[in-house]
Amino acid sequence: MFRISQFMKELVNPTPIGPKRNPPGPVVIWNLVRRCNLNCKHCYALSTDTDFPGELNTGEVFTVMDDLKEFRVPVLILSGGEPLLRPDIYDISHRAKNMGFYTALSTNGTLIDETNIDQIAAVEYDYVGISLDGIGATHDAFRRKEGAYAASLKGARLCKERDIKVGLRFTMTMDNAYELPDLLQLMEDEDIDKFYLSHLNYAGRGNTNRTDDARAEITRRAMDLLFETALKDAREGRERDIVTGNNDADGVYLLHWVRQHYPQKADHMQGKLEQWGGNASGVNVANIDNLGNVHPDTMWWHHNLGNVKDRSFGDIWMDTSDPIMAGLKQYPRKINGRCGACEHFAICNGNTRVRALQVTDDPWAEDPACYLSDAEIGIDTPTTRVETTPYRSKHHAVA
């Protein structure tokens, strides 16, 4: 995750540059259930409104939570499908909070209403993220359900009324990028705490619909708007959080933006960006799917590292006999093409590997969604290929 607001605070009130530090364990995004009441165009989990056999029961979930705590995982993001369709979601959530995890709920928001807002508030989630892919009919079209926008907005408002920190998540494509200003205005009007722009990643239905990915110039304009909005917040002392995900080239683009607008701050910003270090899949970000399979992140559901029913999460996560995990954990990573030749590799860390895999069948190829020019990444001559471990698929059908 690229925390724009945090970097804009560095422009206003710089802090000392320290060494790059990894958290004690990875943030775990846990797809507790695959069932969903919606059928979204870009769903990485290929969810639908049906029950999927083989999902972890409550006792198995609790056992895994103990393993995660022992492995020093600091954050649990409870996701789906739609996690509110899981009957034991509140039992799981309360236990997570009692165990000391930073506990977030990732929901489409349509099922938050007067019948369950008391239960949601009682959990005291650290954060509730609600997906919106546009205003009104645009969102409904993405979610393939009329009335989804109104229901999700109602859910956000109910959370705000109960003083729950709530954020909006927006997956940007060519079909909805023009509504980004309207969503930021909605954030202002509704006093929303956080805004997360997710670049389209090529997984699940997001891979099927990758021709809708936002083009480079539109992406750059979107980032300019987010930078300006977050900088205004920093200058005014507002504590809203604006972040992006799934395209670590955002960090390099920010450096060029600072060089253009605040050149005297560019060296400091470069130091802070290198301290951040870019893509952390397989290192600081992990995923457990509804069946208990562990993945390098949520976009790698086609590649299983092991199952928490058979081995502890920690044993699975530290096992580098898997070539994907060995490559992701290597520092610096060995990446080919433009990414490997980029002079700002220390900021981006090779960007998102699953997009490279989906397009080229090589996880170590350049990321096809980098929106920076050759000049911006310091490439003056043709790139050369470095030797990397061939990709050996561990494809498993996700039931």
Image (cartoon, helix red, strand yellow):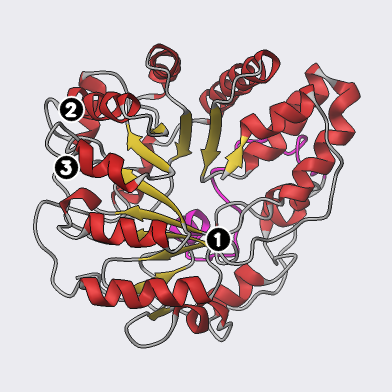
Q: Locate residue 324: give its quadrant.
A: bottom right
Which SS class for mark 1?
loop
Residue drawn at (63%, 30%), measured in percent from left and top? Answer: 5
Contact? badges 1 and 2 (CB < 8 Å): no
**Quick check: is 378 in the magenta stretch?**
yes
Q: Locate residue 233: give its quadrant.
A: top right
Left or right for 263, reference 309? right
Please identify the quadrant where the N terminus is shown. top right
The numbered mark, 2 or 3, whose residue comes first in the sequence reads: 3
Amino acid type, residue under disc 1 in the picture: Ser
Q: Which residues are magenta?
A: 354-380
Front label number (2 vs 3): 2
**Residue 56 visible in image:** no
In percent of width and height, residue 183 lies at 40, 19
Residue 73 marker = none
Q: Is residue 287 above or below residue 291?
A: above
**Which residue position is annotated with label 2?**
151
Residue drawn at (23%, 56%), measured in percent from left and top? Answer: 89
**Which residue position is annotated with label 1?**
281
